Image (tube, rainbow, N blue to C red):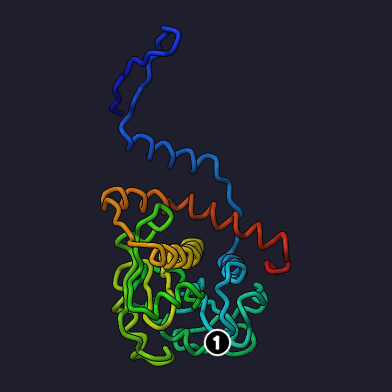
């Protein structure tokens, strides 16, 4: 641990020593304190996915039956997803489906959304991805219509610094394998992607992270459109943006943020957990 001691003069002639540490020290300290103080609910993947749907619905991500939320099941080659015909605000642990890697239903009643097929391409290409959130919220959808990638110019949008891909051409309704290949390749190794003429997608190592990135991507698009209407968006220092990206994506911070929005959902309807 490196630090420098400064002697500060106070108004009445008194003095005090102030230790100024390297900023990395504070990042480490913050992580350790989060691990020690953030006690989070032990929800199952099924419960987290149901909560994710309700969170996104409450944040304005619903678009009729469009959009999908999925997560890997406990058994390899299985996936949890929504029953087609239900909106995000109707999802509970009891009405989720478990499907195989060709969208055949293994548990539950009904049919999965045919557009979930492109999720399977991402899961196959990215073994560490545990959950995918894809929605068509209004500001993301508007941004996707004008051929402009997501801009990172505010602390709250640094989640996406060098971590948001941009698919410039719309491949059509993603119910086939070709659309899955195109979207999966465009996403590459990034956590998020803005899909031209379509919406947003977050593919992450946890349900919590995919939910928070999906939610904040819509906020980022809203900020961007507001800023574009007022003037020119100014860039931020890439090194500072990277630091903020890593800070905002600390796993315990993401999980605590997810828990906060989950509490808001559960105050309205605790039946979501089954």
Left or right of 144 in this view: 133? right
**Residue at image point 51% right, 75% down:** 138
Tell me residue 21's x, y (percent). Answer: 33, 28
**Residue at image point 55% right, 45% down:** 38
Looking at the rendering, in which quadrant would you find the N terminus?
Answer: top left
Tell me residue 216's x, y (percent). Answer: 47, 62
**Residue at image point 58% right, 85% down:** 65
Closer to the camera in the image, 40 or 100:
40
Left or right of 239 in this view: 205? right
Residue 159 falls in which quadrant of the image? bottom left
Secondary structure at badge 1 equals: loop
Looking at the rendering, in which quadrant would you find the C terminus?
Answer: bottom right
**Residue at image point 36% right, 79% down:** 146
Closer to the camera in the image, 110 or 193:
193
User: Relative to 266, does residue 139 appear above or below in the rendering?
Assistant: below
Residue behind mark 1: 112
Tell me residue 250's x, y (percent). Answer: 42, 51
Closer to the camera in the image, 243 or 42:
243
Residue lying furthest front: 230
Left or right of 144 in this view: 47? right
Tell me residue 96's x, y (percent). Answer: 61, 78
Residue 205 visible? The answer is: no
């Amino acid at each position: 641990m490196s630090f420098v001691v400064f002697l500060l003069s106070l108004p009445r002639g008194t003095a005090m020593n102030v230790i100024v540490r390297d900023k990395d020290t504070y990042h480490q300290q913050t992580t350790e304190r989060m691990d020690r103080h953030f006690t989070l609910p032990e929800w199952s993947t099924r419960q987290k996915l149901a909560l994710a749907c309700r969170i996104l619905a409450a944040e304005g991500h619903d678009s009729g039956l469009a959009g999908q939320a999925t997560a890997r099941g406990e058994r390899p080659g299985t996936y949890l997803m929504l029953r087609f015909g239900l909106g995000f605000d109707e999802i509970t642990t009891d009405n989720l489906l478990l499907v195989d890697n060709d969208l055949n239903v293994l548990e539950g009643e009904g049919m999965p959304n045919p557009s979930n097929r492109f999720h399977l391409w991402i899961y196959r290409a990215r073994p560490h991805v545990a959950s995918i959130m894809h929605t068509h919220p209004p500001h993301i959808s508007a941004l996707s219509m004008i051929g402009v990638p997501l801009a990172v110019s505010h602390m709250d949008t640094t989640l996406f610094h060098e971590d948001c891909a941009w698919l410039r051409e719309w491949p059509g309704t993603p119910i086939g394998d070709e659309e899955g290949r195109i979207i999966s390749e465009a996403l590459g190794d990034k956590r998020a992607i803005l899909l031209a003429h379509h919406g947003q997608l977050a593919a992450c190592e946890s349900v919590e992270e995919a939910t928070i990135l999906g939610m904040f991507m819509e906020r980022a698009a809203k900020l961007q459109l507001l800023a574009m209407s007022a003037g020119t968006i100014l860039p931020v220092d890439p090194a500072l943006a990277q630091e903020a990206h890593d800070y905002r994506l600390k796993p315990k911070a993401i999980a605590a943020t997810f828990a906060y929005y989950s509490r808001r959902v559960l105050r309205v309807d605790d039946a979501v957990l089954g």
